[in-house]
């Protein structure tokens, strides 16, 4: 039984419930841990493994304060705030000293020596331009990634990075493959995407973000990036430390060099760090803890346009970056062929069918293109939209109310025959029934199989009207539920007696009985005097300790309430340690 746990157990018992919850969360304690009382909690928190898990999370200031205390240098005015933090983490005791297990773990660790004064230097005009271009490229590439994720979930490897197949697909689309994993991480930080069963899916937040202007997109990413920075990089004002200091801020984390380098690279991609480590003007407000101010960045970004040129060859040209909301809708109707300041798009029967399946109509498409076009709507494009809309829905998919099976019907008997013999659709098990085809496969699965096979299918509801079904709907927003320690704290409080000394003595005696240890016991006699006995503990129950008195070689039973103190005697030396 560790004697170092007793002072911590007493401190834990006196701490408010809210402070205990914060401590347990910071130390990574499971809410269902099998602790019975505060002594269990204290012993677990002082285990070497628990201490080793916590030390890498300490900031440079906290590690310095703890190292000073562990090496006998004490605290100073500069380390006083950190001492309070370390006390709250159960790494320091109220007297400002660490428990021996903590001191042992810290004493041999080293700290970085930072002697030079680090300041943030403003970027040059050329560096500003490069940073703005980098931010614009990153935001645009991320929007492309999110649109791909909206179309179909992106597969991840077990390591959390994009699968090679996804990267090849994005490379074919002209995206910068070397930064894709960082962009996906930034999107996850801003809650634009979520990962479900190793698949990246767009969230409702991501849907809204796609329709923001470029500067607003950047501001949302930058603020989310700052909010997610580790404690060691944040300042009291809510900003961040000068970037040259980032590499030193978690000195006892063996993975910190790699982590800090990754964070610096992501800051660079967002244009928060300029060439040579200088600071662009639009990053200063974020560094100081204020909301993102994208005005200076906006001035250096290409001007967005809200008009396009529609051409007879079924293509469209945007003379500049198309406004985000317009671009997202246009890309739901046409496939983008090139991504540059002047983007090009191409309309096909497949792309228009995709728009119709997503809820557009021929009228809504033509109205949108009419408002967007500087050149009117060319006749070939109008014809393509009209003809595709006329064919859309020729194949109707619905659930038969009587049988529960999926039914496929069409007014075009030839088209229905083609569906019935299509080898690609064999897995659906389509069988001939009066007036159409039938399948045991679910309605949505049949519909998407037909759509993928390029049949003009539509889903029909029970009222006979076409329905719009999202193939990859955004998952519902879920707030991350913090671990609740209410039941754990209540359980520990239930075992908390009014006399901590008596509780600790009972615990020590139980441990001695289990270990069959020899105890040096000081016992109060009826006449008020005290007497010492060496007792080989053998049993404890009914408020009495049983054991063999070594000096008299007799069995004794002692009332626990009469025992003043107990020490475990070392069999080899006969010396004792405080219990």
Image (tube, helix red, strand yellow):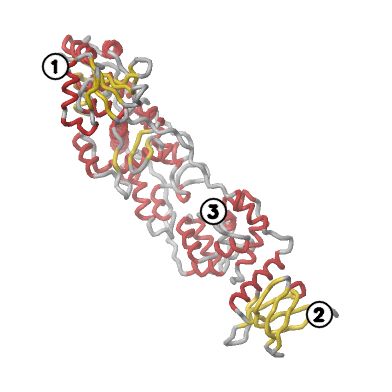
Closer to the camera in the image, 41 or 465: 465
Distance from Cα at disc 1 to Cα at disc 2 = 108 Å
Q: Is mark 3 on a helix, strand or loop?
A: loop
Q: Which residue lies furthest to the right in this view?
A: 527
Residue 194 x %, y %: 38, 38
Q: Which of the two labelled residues, at mark 3 and mark 1, occupies the earlier sequence position?
A: 3
Q: Return the residue found at the far left.
A: 313
Quadrant in which residue 366 is drawn: top left
Left or right: 57 with respect to 468?
right
Residue ID at (68%, 71%) = 505
Picture disc at residue 525: 2
Q: Using a 10 Å C-alpha cutoff, classify the residue at mark 3 as few (fewer than 14 neighbours), some (14 to 19) or many (20 or more).
A: few
Q: Residue at x 33, y 45 (%)?
A: 265
> Which numbered mark, 3 or 1, is in the foreground of this view?
3
Quadrant, the N terminus = bottom right
Q: Which of marks 1 and 2 is nearer the N terminus?
A: 1
Q: In this view, does 517 lie to the left or right of 426?
A: right
Kindly report which numbered mark, 1 or 2, lies closer to the viewer in this rendering. 2
Q: Quadrant of residue 562?
A: bottom right
Residue contact between numbered discs 2 and 3, judged by CB atoms under 8 Å: no
Q: How crowded is mark 2: few (under 14 residues within 10 Å), some or many (20 or more)?
A: few
**In terms of depth relative to the viewer, which is nearer, 435 or 224?**
435
Please state which of the two labelled residues, at mark 2 or mark 3, is closer to the viewer: 3
| Dot 2 or dot 3, earlier in sequence | 3
- Residue 32, x across and y down, in percent: 54, 53
Decide which of 178, 121 is in the foreground and name it: 178
Q: What element carries label 1?
A: loop
Q: Name the residue under label 3.
A: 32
> What secondary structure is found at the residue carrying circle 2?
loop
Marks 3/1: CA distance?
66 Å
Residue under pointer 1: 313
């Amino acid at each position: 039984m560790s004697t170092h746990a007793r002072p911590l157990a007493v401190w834990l018992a006196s701490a408010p419930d809210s402070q205990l919850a914060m401590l347990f969360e910071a130390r990574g304690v499971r809410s269902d841990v099998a602790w019975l009382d505060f002594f269990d909690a204290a012993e677990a928190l002082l285990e070497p493994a628990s201490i080793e898990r916590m030390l890498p999370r300490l900031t440079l200031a906290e590690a310095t304060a703890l190292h000073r205390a562990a090496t006998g240098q004490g605290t100073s005015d500069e380390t006083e705030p950190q001492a309070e933090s370390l006390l709250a983490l159960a790494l320091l005791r109220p007297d400002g000293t660490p428990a021996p297990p903590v001191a042992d773990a810290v004493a041999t660790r080293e700290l970085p020596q930072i002697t030079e004064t680090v300041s943030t230097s403003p970027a040059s005009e050329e560096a500003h331009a490069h940073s703005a271009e980098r931010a614009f490229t990153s935001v645009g590439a991320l929007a492309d990634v999110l649109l791909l994720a909206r179309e179909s979930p992106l597969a991840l490897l077990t390591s959390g990075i994009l699968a090679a197949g996804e990267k090849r697909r994005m490379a074919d689309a002209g995206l910068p493959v070397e930064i894709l994993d960082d962009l996906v991480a930034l999107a996850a930080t801003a809650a634009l995407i979520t990962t479900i069963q190793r698949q990246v899916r767009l969230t409702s937040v991501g849907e809204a973000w796609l329709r923001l202007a470029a500067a607003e997109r950047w501001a949302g990413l930058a603020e989310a990036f700052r909010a997610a920075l580790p404690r060691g990089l944040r300042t009291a004002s809510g900003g961040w430390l000068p970037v040259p200091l980032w590499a030193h801020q978690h000195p006892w984390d063996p993975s910190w060099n790699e982590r800090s380098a990754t964070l610096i690279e992501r800051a660079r991609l967002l244009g928060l760090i300029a060439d040579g480590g200088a600071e662009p003007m639009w990053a200063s407000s974020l560094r100081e803890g204020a909301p993102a101010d994208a005005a200076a960045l906006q001035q250096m970004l290409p001007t967005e346009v809200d008009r396009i040129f529609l051409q007879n060859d079924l293509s469209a040209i945007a003379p500049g970056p198309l406004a985000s909301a317009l671009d997202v809708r246009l890309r739901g109707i046409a496939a983008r062929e090139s991504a540059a300041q002047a983007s090009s798009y191409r309309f096909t029967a497949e792309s228009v069918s995709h728009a119709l399946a997503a809820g557009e109509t021929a009228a809504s498409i033509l109205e949108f293109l009419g408002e967007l076009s500087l050149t009117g709507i060319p006749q070939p494009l109008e014809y393509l939209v009209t003809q595709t809309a006329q064919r859309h829905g020729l194949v109707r998919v619905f659930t038969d109310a009587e049988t529960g099976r999926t039914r496929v019907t069409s007014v075009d008997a030839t088209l229905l025959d083609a569906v019935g013999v299509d080898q690609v659709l064999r897995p659906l098990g389509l069988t001939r029934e009066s007036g159409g085809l039938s399948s045991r496969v679910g309605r949505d699965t049949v519909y998407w199989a037909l759509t993928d096979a390029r049949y003009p299918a539509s889903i029909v509801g029970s009222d006979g009207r076409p329905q719009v079904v999202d193939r990859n709907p955004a998952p519902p927003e879920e707030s991350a539920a913090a671990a609740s320690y209410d039941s754990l704290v209540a359980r520990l409080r239930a075992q908390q007696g009014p006399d901590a000394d008596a509780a600790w003595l009972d615990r020590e005696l139980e441990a001695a009985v289990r270990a069959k240890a020899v105890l040096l016991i000081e016992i109060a006699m009826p006449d008020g005097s005290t007497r010492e006995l060496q007792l080989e503990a053998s049993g404890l129950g009914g408020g009495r300790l049983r054991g063999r008195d070594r000096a008299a070689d007799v069995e004794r039973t002692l009332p626990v309430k009469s025992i003043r103190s107990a020490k475990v005697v070392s069999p080899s030396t006969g010396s004792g340690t405080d219990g």
